[in-house]
Image: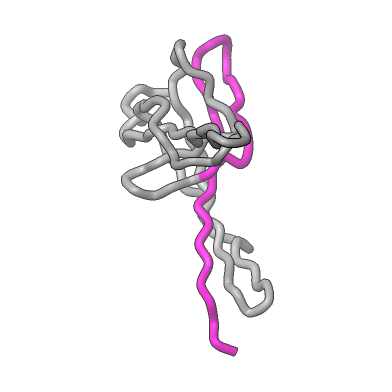
Amino acid sequence: MSIGKRDVFVIFEVREFTREPTYGTKVEGGWVKASDAWAEVQDVLPSRSENIDQNVNIQRRPARIRVDYFDGIDVTSSMRIDIDGRKLRIVAGPAEKGHRKEWEMMAEELSAEGHDP
């Protein structure tokens, strides 16, 4: 992979959790930055990416994302990726390509649009 193709700056975010003071249970918080990297982002061409579910049109915008392997952080499927305000969830991978050379993952942005009956 050519380093010149890594032309999109992405931010990996993780869900923040806090403890409820009375019972000590985990409370889901917001998303916080875990790391960032330059990436190659390839949007997957549209095909049958739209589904109709009970009068709601759900469109998935998948993308293949490749980043150089970097130490100090593990990219996991529980993270999400911010690409210029576009929030994507990791749906496949990350898979390590080569021995500590690069990570590749599939991510998708979900959008829902209601339709009047």
Foreground of the two, 56 or 28: 28
Quadrant (top left/top right/bottom left/bottom right) for the C terminus:
bottom right
In percent of width and height, residue 113 lies at 51, 72
Residue in view at x 47 percent, y 48 percent: 43
Task: Out of 107 and 46, give the one closest to the viewer.
Answer: 107
Q: Give, as a single range, the part of the protein colored magenta.
A: 89-117
Asked whether 101 falls inside the magenta stretch, the response is: yes
Residue 94 lies within the magenta run: yes
Q: In percent of the image, x 32 and y 34: which residue is there? A: 9
Pick the front one: 34 or 88: 34
- Is 3 left, or right, of 91 in this rendering? left
Q: Quadrant of the N terminus?
A: top left
Residue lying farthest to the front in this orientation: 22
**Which residue sits furthest bottom?**
117
**Residue drawn at point x = 35 percent, y = 22 percent:** 3
Kindly give the residue lying farthest to the right in the view shown. Answer: 54
- Horizontal and vertical percent position of residue 30: 44, 42
Examine the rendered structure and indicate whether residue 70 appears above or below residue 85.
above
Q: Quadrant of residue 70?
A: top left
User: Residue 51: horizontal and vertical position, in percent?
Assistant: 64, 68
